[in-house]
Image: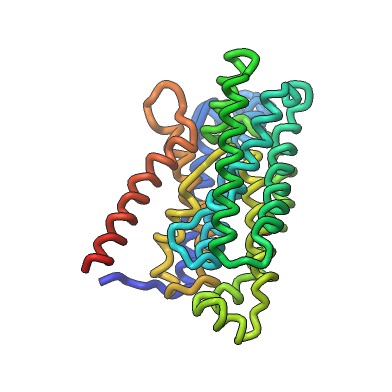
């Protein structure tokens, strides 16, 4: 028998968990642990201590929390809108489009001359994807939207493969591959300042659609009879996902499965309410991605694993389990 926590208590626990992993992230990593940092302060190496904590670990921690929260919230919103528990931000092509923009920045060499061109081109790719998606889907049904997303995602994947195939030198190809694996390492507060406002806009749009998602759980006709404006809701969900996830992907690269796994883990705890699941998934996604980022620093692998690799290793078995469970439910 599963225990369902009161909703406010669930949010508090998830927030505390995310903060706890965030604090742990500030204490470990290259440069030493708390003892080494204190020793630097005692010996007058304040600049070195600040460089390690404030310029290396703080941006990494903030981005892990922001990206995880964005992916969790967007995944919950898309699953609510599409009424499909297997949906995640990648299903509408936003992740692939943002990745393509960043890959083009690496392939063309623009990112070498202007480092912030990489996230800026990634964000531009996500915004263009949202515009194209709305145009292709028109006023069609959910299936039309999904098919349009699959088409955009496939095209972006093909163009990224073409960029790798035509890469002018192996170093550029390696740089593209490493970026696509996903990571929040070697990011600065400039990246935080660039992504945070866009993510906040996306979060606000998704939160505005929360009540409409509750009504949509009854079906589009029932939701329309209750006064829900379906095109507006779709614009909020797709636009909010494109802006927030596009900014997250442009900064961190490809990090998958957070938007799929977290809503599934928390759905029963919120009484299967899409509106309540949004905030819970935001906190849960932040906690899960922060925990994964701490894990990559603790694993004795010699070379630090990429964050996207770890989330895939966690998410892929979970996805297979969902498939087997769904098949068992159909057969029973």
* Residue 19 sits above or below residue 295 on the image: below
- Is 217 situated above or below 197? below
Q: Nearer the viewer, residue 315 or 164?
A: 164
Residue sitting farthest toward the left: 332
Point 57% across, 73% down: residue: 213
Nearer to us in this view, 49 or 307: 307
Could you tell me which quadrant the C terminus lies in? bottom left
Q: How many marks?
A: 0
Against 288, residue 102 (above or below) is above
User: Residue at point 68% right, 46% down?
Assistant: 126
Using residue 229 as the reference point, say whether residue 30 is left or right of it: left
Residue 75 image position (x, y, % from top left): 53, 57
In which quadrant of the rendered image does the N terminus lie?
bottom left
Residue 177 location, x and y as percent? 54, 26
Colour convention of the picture: rainbow
Q: Is residue 206 visible?
A: yes
Nearest the eye: 220 or 54: 220
Residue 202 showing in the rendered view: no
Horizontal and vertical percent for residue 33?
Answer: 49, 31
Q: Residue furthest top?
A: 169
| 103 with respect to 35 (left or right) | right
Who's the residue at 49% across and 46% down the image?
Answer: 289
Q: Position of residue 173 (x, y in %)?
A: 58, 20
Q: Is residue 154 above or below residue 241?
A: above
In-front residue for pair 91/5:
91
Residue occupying image coordinates x 51% and y 31%: 29
Residue at the far right in the pictured view: 114
């Amino acid at each position: 028998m599963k225990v369902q926590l009161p909703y406010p208590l669930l949010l508090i626990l998830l927030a505390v968990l995310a903060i706890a992993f965030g604090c742990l992230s500030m204490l470990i990593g290259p440069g030493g642990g708390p003892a080494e940092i204190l020793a630097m302060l005692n010996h007058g190496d304040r600049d070195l201590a600040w460089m390690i904590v404030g310029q290396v670990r703080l941006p990494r921690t903030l981005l892990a929390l922001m990206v995880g929260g964005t992916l969790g919230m967007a995944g919950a919103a898309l699953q609510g809108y599409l009424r499909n528990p297997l949906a995640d931000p990648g299903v509408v092509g936003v992740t692939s489009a943002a990745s393509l923009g960043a890959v083009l920045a690496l392939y063309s060499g623009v990112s070498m001359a202007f480092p912030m061109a990489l996230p800026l081109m990634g964000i531009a790719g996500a915004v263009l994807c949202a515009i194209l998606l709305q145009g292709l889907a028109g006023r069609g049904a959910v299936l039309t939207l999904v098919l349009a997303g699959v088409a955009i995602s496939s095209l972006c994947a093909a163009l990224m493969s073409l960029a790798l195939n035509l890469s002018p030198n192996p170093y550029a190809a390696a740089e593209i591959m490493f970026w696509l694996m996903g990571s929040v390492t070697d990011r600065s507060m400039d990246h935080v300042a660039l992504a945070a406002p866009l993510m906040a806009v996306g979060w606000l749009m998704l939160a505005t659609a929360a009540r409409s998602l509750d009504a949509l759980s009854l079906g589009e006709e029932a939701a329309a009879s209750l006064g829900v404006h379906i095109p507006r809701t779709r614009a909020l969900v797709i636009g909010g996902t494109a802006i927030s996830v596009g900014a997250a992907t442009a900064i961190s690269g490809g990090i998958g499965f957070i938007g799929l796994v977290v809503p599934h883990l928390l759905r029963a705890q919120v009484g299967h309410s899409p509106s309540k699941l949004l905030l819970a998934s935001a906190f849960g996604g932040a906690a899960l991605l922060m925990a994964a980022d701490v894990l990559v620093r603790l694993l004795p692998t010699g070379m630090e694993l990429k964050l996207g690799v770890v989330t895939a290793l966690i998410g892929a078995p979970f996805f297979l389990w969902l498939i087997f469970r769904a098949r068992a439910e159909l057969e029973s």
